[in-house]
Image: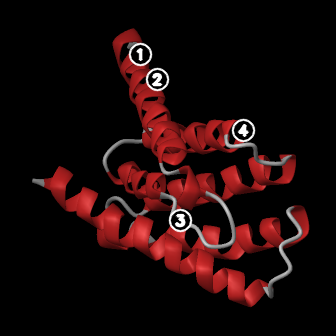
Amino acid sequence: MKNKHAAFLTQAAMIAAIYVVLTLLFRPVSFGEIQVRIAEALTILPLFTPAAVPGVFAGCLIANILGGGILVDIIFGSLATLIGAVLTYRLRNCAPLLGPLPPIASNTVIIPFVLFYGYGFNLPIPFMMLTVGIGEVLSCGLLGLTLYFALKR
């Protein structure tokens, strides 16, 4: 039992570390009202392991802190990723190809409010939903499904 717990924690930590590195490596496109956070492709991993749920959450939390996020972004931005990861995990047995939809939806709905009220971006919330949504479709949808099929082999 100890080995299973250690393996779970190791997987979660590795996923978190990869998330942080990808977010900071691609920092210019990872933050802001128009963003394509490449690391969000990792939100497909809960289809393969439950350790990915805390992994992507912790990775997002750490990346938001290290990326200079404000408290509301650190909390709600990370929660958006957690919600997406949990719901993706729940799809693992019934509809895995729909796995990218929960993180796309949660980030598309939550992040524009963080940008508007937290950072004071003076753009209409529906417009930021569109820009964040497009970024999420690219990262979670396109890159996430590419990762899914690569790992599924």
Give the CA separation, mark 1 to mark 3. 27 Å
Which residue is denoted by mark 4 in the rendering? 65
Contact check, label 2 and label 1, Cβ < 8 Å = yes
83 over 107 or under it: above or below: above
Q: Which amino acid does label 3 sit on?
A: Pro
Residue type at tag 4: Ile
Give the image quarter of residue 57.
top right
Q: Which mark is residue 111?
A: none
Who comes first in sequence, dot 1 or dot 3?
Answer: 1
Q: Is residue 84 left or right of residue 45?
A: right
Label 3 or label 2, whichever comes before in sequence order:
2
Q: Position of residue 145 (x, y in %)?
A: 29, 66
Quick one: SS at disc 2?
Answer: helix
Q: Is residue 76 visible?
A: yes
User: SS for tag 4?
Assistant: helix
The foreground one among 117 and 78 is 117
Neighbor class of circle 2 (other Cα within 10 Å; few <14, some 14-19, many 20+) is some
Looking at the rendered structure, the number of numbered marks drawn on it comes to: 4
- Seen as rendered, the residue at the extreme front is 28
Mark toward the viewer: 1 or 3 = 3
